[in-house]
Amino acid sequence: MIRFAITFVLAAAIPLGDAVAADAPQQAAATEFRIHPIGHIKKANDRMLIVLDKKYQDGLLGLEQWSHVQVIWWFDKNDTPQQRSILQVHPRGNPQNPLTGVFACRAPVRPNLIGLSLCKVLAVNDNVVEVETIDAFEGTPVLDLKPFAPGQDLASGVKVPKWAGPK
Ligand SMILES: C[S@@+](CC[C@H](N)C(=O)[O-])C[C@H]1O[C@@H](n2cnc3c(N)ncnc32)[C@H](O)[C@@H]1O
């Protein structure tokens, strides 16, 4: 099984679902987490599929009621110490674009190789989600799926740098 070690620096690890009181006791900082892919991207005959391992199929219950899903995946083709050490790039590989921090753009090289794609859901069948399109390669490991919830995920007063704006 493929495993990824992800290193984060956190002030404290917070148990899921717990309210955080100002005087809550601080837990020891976790610096490393182990992540297991839940499936992979399959591209066949112009169809784009997220194929989950069968053991995660139950987790798809209800996803067909959402129009869009956020797919969290791993830039596995860039998983080298050299590529994970890159902190600044010219976005979109275009030297004309200003040097930009990887946390200020969507570069496929970054310390933790997490990709995020918002996809239109076309169908959910058994352990397979068909999406309209996704910018991840065939075979890309998928880490998580979360439905796009406009109430939570929509931003107002959005601004973007010039290089990312309309051409
Ligand atoms: C600019 S990145 C953006 C990805 C995602 N939408 C995001 O914002 O995190 C998209 C590019 O990553 C590259 N890519 C796709 N799958 C990859 C993989 N498994 N490993 C490395 N690079 C990948 C492709 O060149 C693709 O065009």
Image: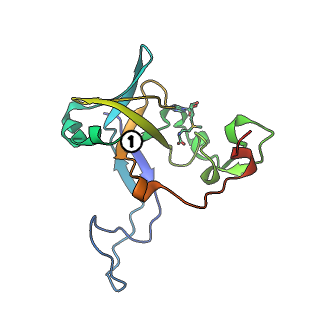
For image coordinates 39% across by 71% down, the residue present is 12
Quarter placement of the N terminus = top left
* Closest to the observer, 119 or 150: 150
For image coordinates 42% across by 35% down, the residue present is 120
What residue type is disc 1 on? Val
Secondary-structure class at tag 1: strand
- What crowding class fits label 1: few (fewer than 14 Cα within 10 Å), some (14-19), or many (20 or more)? many
Q: Is residue 162 left or right of residue 59?
A: right
Give the residue number, with chain letter if any, for mark 1: 69
In x, y percent, where is residue 75?
50, 37
Quarter placement of the C terminus = top right
Residue 40 in view: yes
* Closest to the observer, 132 or 91: 132
Residue 128 in view: no
In x, y percent, where is residue 126?
21, 29
For image coordinates 48% across by 55% down, the residue present is 154
